[in-house]
Image (spheres, grey):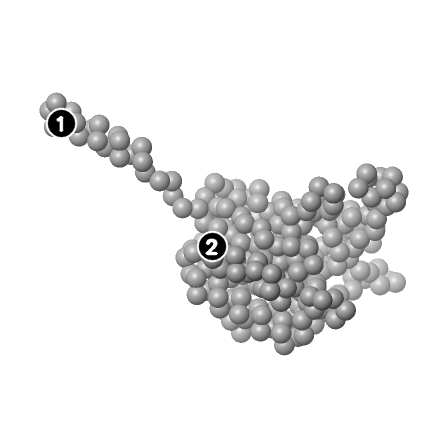
Amino acid sequence: MKLKMILPLLLLSAAAFVLPPKKVKIFLAGDSTMSIKDIKAYPENGWGMPFVYFWDSTVQVINLAKNGRSTSSFKREGLWGKIMEECEKGDYVFIQFGHNDEVPTKKSATTETEFKNNLVQYVKEARSKGGTPVLITPVARRKFDSTGKVVGTHDVYAQIVRDVAALEKTPLIDLDVQAQQLYQQLGVEASKLLFVHLQPGEHPNYPTGKIDDTHFSELGARKVAQIVLKDIRTLVPELATRIKNPAVK
């Protein structure tokens, strides 16, 4: 067979074995407000659940957030280590803790100093792997005072996250402030739709009902995910190009 006939066949064979381009990975490190829920917990959703659907085919979201975890227990249980094993140059690590760090009666509790040191460690280790860390304040709980004004419940630990972001020059998504603004905009009654508020008999998973102002409904999780995506468009523009419909504000 003549060379000019063989060459196209060789090129076609080589093309068949070309590997697809490596996907950019977004790791989610956090607690129950971000995590994937078991079916038995529905309609409770972490905001990391709808977050995966906003990205094009070049992105893989890996959600390792777990219920009840703090910066200390997430590390102690090997979850952070798993992220560091898989994180490569060009990947992103979104870090959101505080809910369980700040409660002194929990086994997962960390002091303010420990919390700060853990966040600094996470940022430095993510960068050492070639990843881009993004810090996120603990997302606000739904709490109103007697006048209908939203009250913050993460003031101290949210500020620590802000301080670390400034110290380490890390992108910061302030879910504490922005979620409070969302709840205030909706008001006392309408904001309940963002959370797991169920009457007895309304859902088979909660036959006696449930009132939970920390964990999100499907609607609430999507609204919080949209806040995160909005900030990504301005804070991490190189990643924003991979959002479906990146021009939508």
Secondary element under disc 1, as helix, strand or loop, is helix
Identify residue type, mark 1: Lys
Q: Quadrant of residue 67?
A: bottom right
Residue type indicated by callout 2: Glu
Q: Position of residue 108 (x, y in %)?
A: 69, 66
Mark 2 surroundings within 10 Å by alpha-carbon count, few (fewer than 14), some (14 through 19), many (20 or more): few
Residue with the most extreme top position: 1
Q: Nearer the viewer, mark 2 or mark 1?
A: 2
- Say which of 151 and 209 sits in front: 209
Residue at numbered disc 1 = 4
Identify the residue shown where x is 58% and y is 73%.
117
Decide if residue 173 is in sight here. no
Q: Residue furthest left?
A: 2
Q: Quickly name the residue at label 2.
A: 86
Q: Residue at x 63, y 46 (%)?
A: 49
Q: Position of residue 84 (x, y in %)?
A: 49, 59
Task: Classify mark 1: residues with Cα within 10 Å, few (<14), some (14-19) or many (20+).
Answer: few
Percent of width and height locating residue 41:
74, 45
